[in-house]
């Protein structure tokens, strides 16, 4: 048995930051990867991880993914995930789990590529007839806790509902032989997270820079408080849940990331440090790390 790993493929947000690929994570157990979300760049990031020595992330081996919600930043890599591994000779259909609407999204994306599909399946390029297919398992809206929605010899996956505004949004808890890992997706602070992340080995949770939000207009502040989690509130949640390791991702800094008049990397670094301080100042003294693209936790 190999140790379960959490690998962050992309830790970004809708902002096209050069340093952060779109939201996507992978849990790797016994040489099989289970993806959570497929933001922009997902397959290229998997390829980078493969070249770092993670065999399970070789692009043609990506065949199962769990979607937290249908926002573009978490899903625009779906076309990539459906087609790139297939063109690289994946034969297995892609298994997808997620909210209602995912089935239509997969179907419509597949339809959008009908000309390419036709050429590959019926033209001169030999391609297998199965690897571009998707098998989508939708979770009905309105259920608080779905229980175990997926199970194999490596992992049991529990999906539960979080609160990210009107869009159906899910978080996932992965239980393996040696680890429990909870991935928040996008959400404001929710009670169920405290219960699900209790004593987890890793809680990967979205996070907003609290001080940064104060610079925004009142309307934006209300919106962000309703659909995302401020660092100070993440601290309160973690104080109760007591994960062995808290990892932040999908960090919202509230800054203009396309202002070239300052050093973006340096400015982000300052805000990252500030987020960690906000979490500590709010009373959380457990282990907390800002996750970065291609970080591995095991
Ligand atoms: Zn997002
Ligand atoms: Zn979102």
Image: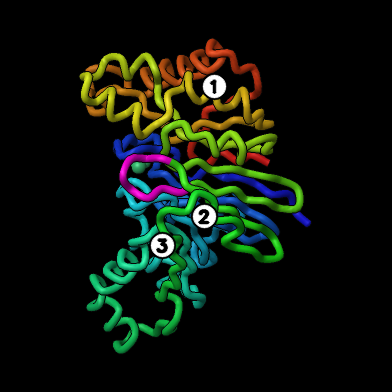
**Distance between mark 2 and mark 1 Cα atoms:** 26 Å
Where is residue 149 drawn, in percent x and y? Answer: 57, 61
The region drawn magenta spans: 163-170
Q: Are marks 3 and 2 in contact (CB under 8 Å)?
A: yes
Q: Is residue 291 visible?
A: yes
Residue at 53% across / 43% down in the picture? Answer: 183
| Closer to us: 127 or 211 | 211
Please state if 139 lies on the left or on the right of 262 as rendered: right
- How dense is the environment of label 1, judged by Cα within 10 Å: few (below 14), some, or many (20 and up)? many
Name the residue carrying label 1.
235
Beta carbon of the mark 1 residue lies under 8 A of ligand 1: no
Q: CA distance from mark 1 to mark 3?
A: 34 Å
Where's residue 14, x and y in %?
A: 31, 39
Q: Which residue is mark 3?
A: 81
Image point (37%, 68%), residue name: 83
Residue 49 in view:
no
Secondary element at image label 3 = helix
288 or 222: which is nearer to us?
222
- Mark 2 is surrounded, within 10 Å at the Cα level, by few (under 14), some (14 to 19) or many (20 or more) other residues, namely many
**Mark 2 or 1: the one toward you:** 1
Circle 2 is placed at which residue position?
A: 35
The image shows residue 147 at horizontal and vertical percentages of 59, 56
Q: Place residue 152 in its image quadrant.
A: bottom right
């Amino acid at each position: 048995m190999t140790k379960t790993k959490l690998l962050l493929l992309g830790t970004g947000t809708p902002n096209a930051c050069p340093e952060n690929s779109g939201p996507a994570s992978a849990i790797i157990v016994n040489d099989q990867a289970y993806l959570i979300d497929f933001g922009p760049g997902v397959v290229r990031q998997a390829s980078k991880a493969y070249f770092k020595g993670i065999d399970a992330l070789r692009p043609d081996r990506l065949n199962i993914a769990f979607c937290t919600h249908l926002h573009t930043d978490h899903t625009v890599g779906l076309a990539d995930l459906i087609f790139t591994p297939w063109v690289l000779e994946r034969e297995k259909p892609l298994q997808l789990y997620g909210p209602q609407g995912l089935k239509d999204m997969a179907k419509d994306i597949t339809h959008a590529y009908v000309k390419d599909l036709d050429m590959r399946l019926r033209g001169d390029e030999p391609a297998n007839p199965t690897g571009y297919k998707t098998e989508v398992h939708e979770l009905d809206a309105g259920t608080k806790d779905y229980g175990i929605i997926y199970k194999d010899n490596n992992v049991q996956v529990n999906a539960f509902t979080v609160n990210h505004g009107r869009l159906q949004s899910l978080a996932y808890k992965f239980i393996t032989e040696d680890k429990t890992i909870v991935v928040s997706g996008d959400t404001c602070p929710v009670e169920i997270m405290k219960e699900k992340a209790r004593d987890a080995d890793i809680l990967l949770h979205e996070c907003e820079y609290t001080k940064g939000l104060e610079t925004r207009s009142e309307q934006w502040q209300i919106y962000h408080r309703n659909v995302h989690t401020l660092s100070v509130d993440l601290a309160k949640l973690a104080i109760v849940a007591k994960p062995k390791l808290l990892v932040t991702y999908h960090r919202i800094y509230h800054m203009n990331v396309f202002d070239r008049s300052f050093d973006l990397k340096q400015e982000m670094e300052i805000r990252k440090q500030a987020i960690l301080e906000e979490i500590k100042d709010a009373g959380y003294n457990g282990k907390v790390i800002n996750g970065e693209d291609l970080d591995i936790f095991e």
